[in-house]
Amino acid sequence: MAKKSRTKARDTAAPAEGEVGPRQPCPCGSGKRYKACHGAAGGATPAFVSRPFEGMPGECDVIALRELVPAATVPLDVKGTDREVRLCTLLPMAAPAMVRDSGAIWLGLQVAHQYGDPARDLGAVLEKALATEEPGIIGLTEAPGEGPRLQDLISNTALDITVHDGFGYWIDDVEERDASMEAALEQADSAANPTTRLAGVEAAYWTNVGTKEHLRWVMPHPEDPLLDALARLHAAGKDTVGEGSRFVGMFRAHGLLAPVWDLPVGTGAEVLEEPAARFAADLEQALADTSDLTPEQRSARAGLANRQVTIR
């Protein structure tokens, strides 16, 4: 008992002036305790970045493509090279990147490196791919350390997003296709839910999951003002995006919220364009309203806050 007590006393002893105690927050800002970060035996663990794609053109769409959309591609203009670079939701075998026989580079968004900053991971993978013309899979085997994020390496001012019915883009540069390729593609396609990007608003995606249809819409606004605005619209009965739609909650992903609506089966994407545009206009008005919430609106806000699921 005495030995255990002495150990506990050492752990809880106050640090000397100017030092950081093992149980105190690490001064690097990671949010971890010092002993689990810069005070760990192996040095700092990768710091989690809450909004990694901030500053990237089409940030909301990039988040949707990473977390919600099965099959989509985006051409990227990379500074300092004329090589073809394509950003893809998913690559064969969930590869982080591929250098194709043509020298083109494909980057995979739906890869979990667990290094804390997916935009930095993408930047590091792209740099590795640019350094070789040898066809093959490119990935990371350790944390990439400091360096540019993907948004630092590209010159795009907007993203030209193509949502695909399936994963046919995996072999769209292959002239001779064998049965194994076709079989793998067919298997992958069977797991992809039909998805359409709405044309009139940013980063809103209709999908059919079989038993239900949804509209999932990644929004760029800070969380607290957005929750206030959504509460105002809910209390006013203006939180629908079409006949029979029901606002059911939100995802939180990479620092932004993505409200979700359930839709009647058979709705489709086309009929959502007009009500979605109307909702967007109503939302902008609600965001501009800085008055105190009414009791009814505060109650709605509390309900909305309880219907959030963090996926990154």
Image: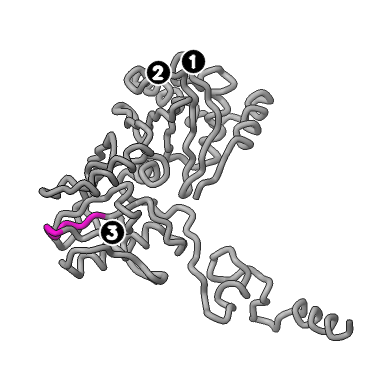
Q: Nearer the viewer, residue 218 or 68?
A: 68
| Residue 160 versus residue 90 in the image, above or below | above
Task: State the colouring used for the structure image.
Answer: one colour
Q: Are marks 1 and 2 in contact (CB under 8 Å)?
A: yes
* Amino acid type for the residue under numbered disc 1: Gly
SS class of the residue under badge 3?
strand
Question: Which badge, 3 or 1, comes first in the chain's sequence?
Answer: 3
Provide residue 89's location: percent of width, then percent of height.
Answer: 32, 47
- Separation (CA) of disc 1 from disc 2: 9 Å
Provide residue 223's location: percent of width, then percent of height.
Answer: 52, 41
Residue range highlighted in magenta:
101-106
Residue under the point 21% across and 46% down = 179
Say whether residue 284 is visible: no
Density class for disc 3 (Cα within 10 Å; few <14, some 14-19, many ≥20) is many
Question: Which badge, 2 or 3, comes first in the chain's sequence?
Answer: 3
Question: Label 2, on which residue?
Answer: 267
* Amino acid type for the residue under numbered disc 3: Ala
Q: Is residue 258 magenta?
A: no
Density class for disc 2 (Cα within 10 Å; few <14, some 14-19, many ≥20) is some
Provide residue 253's location: percent of width, then percent of height.
Answer: 48, 46
